[in-house]
Image (tube, rainbow, N blue to C red):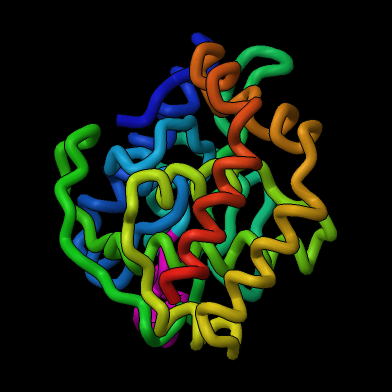
């Protein structure tokens, strides 16, 4: 179950779940979309943080236009306003009514060219009492590993939620797909982990941890992990390198 760190976040979680329920109930969308990302991981109990967006893979790129049509009907049905969207891929920023200075936007992203090595499984999401095709755990972990470095390469900074999720995944000893790492990076897993370790050593600052995670964790969880996250993550990355 996805946590709600602050009372004001309950409405956002409700809107995420309303939207996800409608997607799961749409026979066409449920057949071509594959749920992934932080909200998927949180709903499956793999990370203990709040997540604000919805992410999917599209397994048949030729259905992109139909996916957009079905999604936009759902937005209209729910009364979600399209604040902005991409004309190239299904990506939406959706607005709902909320108080001033509170969350009021959901980002929905669909990857139209997912890695060929991605694997999926049917999962019952108890929070919404629906089943959806989701990333398998090794697929989820591998894509998070690669995304941590690729986002750093694009932005020049690490993203706190990425390193928090990696810490949670590795702490649980969850497996990852070496084939996805190879496909997405063109590097062996061992070479990739060396790159990841350097990124964390040089670029993961206490400021990034504090700013990014303060709003996604309960106060208790935030104060428990903030001091130890970097050193524990570096240790576990080093252990993975030793096993490869």
Residue found at the far front of this picture: 242
Q: Residue at x 40, y 87 (%)?
A: 116
Q: Residue at x 65, y 58 (%)?
A: 85
Q: Residue at x 71, y 14 (%)?
A: 100
**Location of the N terminus (image quadrant):** top left
Q: Camera-side residue: 107 or 149?
A: 149
Q: Camera-side residue: 9 or 63?
A: 9
- The x, y position of residue 118, in whole percent, is 36, 77
Decide whether residue 137 is among the magenta residues.
no
Left or right of residue 159: residue 166: left
- The x, y position of residue 13, in whole percent, is 43, 28
User: Which image quadrant for residue 223?
Assistant: top right
Left or right of residue 43: residue 203: right
Q: Tell me the magenta residue range.
A: 56-69
Evaluate whether residue 31 shows in this view: yes
- The x, y position of residue 63, in whole percent, is 39, 80
Compared with residue 100, is residue 66 higher up or lower down, i.e. above or below? Answer: below
């Amino acid at each position: 179950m996805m946590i709600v760190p602050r009372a004001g976040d309950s409405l956002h979680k409700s809107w995420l779940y309303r939207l996800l329920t409608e997607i799961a109930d749409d026979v066409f969308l449920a057949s071509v979309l594959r749920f992934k990302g932080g909200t998927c991981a949180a709903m499956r109990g793999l990370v203990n943080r709040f997540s604000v967006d919805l992410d999917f893979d599209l397994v048949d790129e030729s259905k992109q236009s139909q996916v957009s049509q079905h999604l936009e009907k759902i937005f209209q049905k729910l009364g979600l306003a399209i604040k902005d969207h991409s004309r190239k891929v299904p990506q939406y920023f959706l607005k709902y009514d909320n108080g001033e200075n509170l969350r009021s936007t959901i980002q929905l992203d669909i990857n139209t060219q997912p890695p060929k090595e991605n694997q999926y499984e049917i999962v019952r999401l108890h929070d919404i009492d629906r089943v959806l095709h989701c990333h398998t755990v090794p697929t989820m972990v591998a894509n998070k590993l690669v995304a941590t470095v690729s986002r750093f390469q694009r932005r020049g900074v690490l993203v706190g939620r990425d390193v928090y999720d990696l810490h949670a995944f590795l702490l649980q000893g969850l497996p990852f797909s070496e084939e996805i790492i190879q496909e997405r990076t063109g590097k062996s897993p061992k070479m990739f982990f060396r790159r990841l370790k350097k990124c964390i050593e040089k670029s993961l600052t206490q400021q990034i941890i504090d700013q990014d995670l303060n709003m996604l964790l309960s106060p208790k969880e935030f104060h428990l992990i903030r001091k130890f996250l970097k050193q524990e993550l570096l240790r576990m990355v080093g252990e993975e390198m030793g096993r490869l």
